[in-house]
Amino acid sequence: MKNLKNSLLAKHFSHIYIEREIIFHPITKIILDKFPNSVLVEIDNYKEVFSRPRQNYKLQEISKKLILAKKKGEFLYPGPPLCHDFGYNHFYYTSLIFNCIFSCDYCFLKGMYSSANIVIFVNIEDYFEEIDSVLKRHPLYLSVSYDTDIMALEKIVPFFSMFIEYATSRKDLTIEIRTKTADYEVLQSLRPSENIILAWTLSPQEIIEKFEHKTPSLSARLDTIKKAIKNEWKVRLCFDPILFTKNWKEIYLKFLNQVFEEVEPSKIVDISVGVFRIPKDYLKRMKKVFVNEITLFPYEEENGIFTYPDELKKEMMDLFISNLSKFVPKSKIFVI
């Protein structure tokens, strides 16, 4: 596969665990063809590896293993209250992949799962069948990159392109694909769809270097966004999470100027804004593994969610939105 040898993915997946039930699935073959030198281990259920007790999360992050499985049970879930529905009445998310190739200090996945290994559910046809069933009842706004970054993993498994092709023929379906990638190559052979919103998470370069490990730089993400817009993709910007850190005011004000010096505001579909927030139980688990600026902050709890104290949160949001409003109308800004 082009560029895989020198990519972030190259040091991972020395071992691939495969549920016996999907050994001959076509998506399994696509994935295995990318890793001819990996050790293959057959298993009965992905949870044997992914959910086993006493795993070393930090060690797994250094060299992730890949687990291929068949999803059973529910395929769609109601959108979580920590995420914005952007005005859609029927907001759902789906998880074809557990975990991410990137390693952001603030990511809820570090508290959601006890393993850093990546699970791919190969039976995407069952997801499509369930989505079609829901579409018979009502329109659907669907986030498909909630537990991962499917665009960043496209060179391993082509779920990103498959969802774009699938959505094009379903007029009542709107799909959001959230990403931090800067790999425009995965878009080059695809035709933009009115049903697809590419949602880039953007952070100041200082925040990226400090908290968003292994992710592309801000300038690289902006370059990819500009190419996507030029080629008529619908683009959303996600300034989320905004983090409290030393010199945060100066950092974020400079950041907004940099973003809109590069990106034409009128070309953006909309923008989401939110400060850091995380379920209480997730943060509790993260603290057991990671000791850093994110986990050590004295957050306040409200309804089982940890976030910044009200006064600080208001100060951060007021400053950010008042300056963001200089570039885009408030009708395009969705606050989480």
Image (spheres, rainbow, N blue to C red):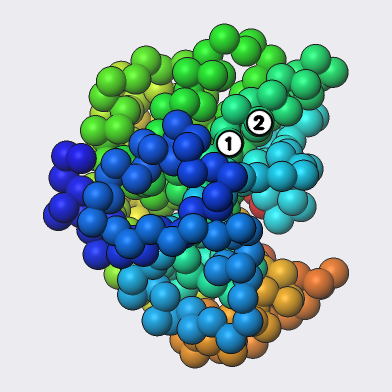
Q: Which residue is mark 1?
A: 123
Few, some or many residues within 10 Å of mark 2 (<14, 14–19, 20+): some
**Position in image of residue 203 (x %, y %):** 40, 57
Q: CA distance from mark 2 to mark 1?
A: 6 Å
C-beta proximity under 8 Å, tags 2 and 1: yes
In the image, which disc is placed on residue 93?
none
- Position of 178 with respect to 298 (left or right) is left
For the N terminus, the image quarter is top left
- Position of 276 with respect to 72 (left or right) is left
- Looking at the image, can residue 53 be seen? yes
Q: Residue at x 81, y 72 (%)?
A: 304
**Position in image of residue 50 (x %, y %):** 57, 67
Element on which disc 2 rests = helix
Vertically, is 1 above or below 107? above
Element on which disc 1 rests = loop
Quadrant hosting residue 14: bottom left
Query: Of the residues shown, which amino acid type is indicated by label 2?
Result: Asp
Vertically, is 252 above or below 169? below
**Position in image of residue 264 (x %, y %):** 34, 30
Q: Which residue is mark 2?
A: 126
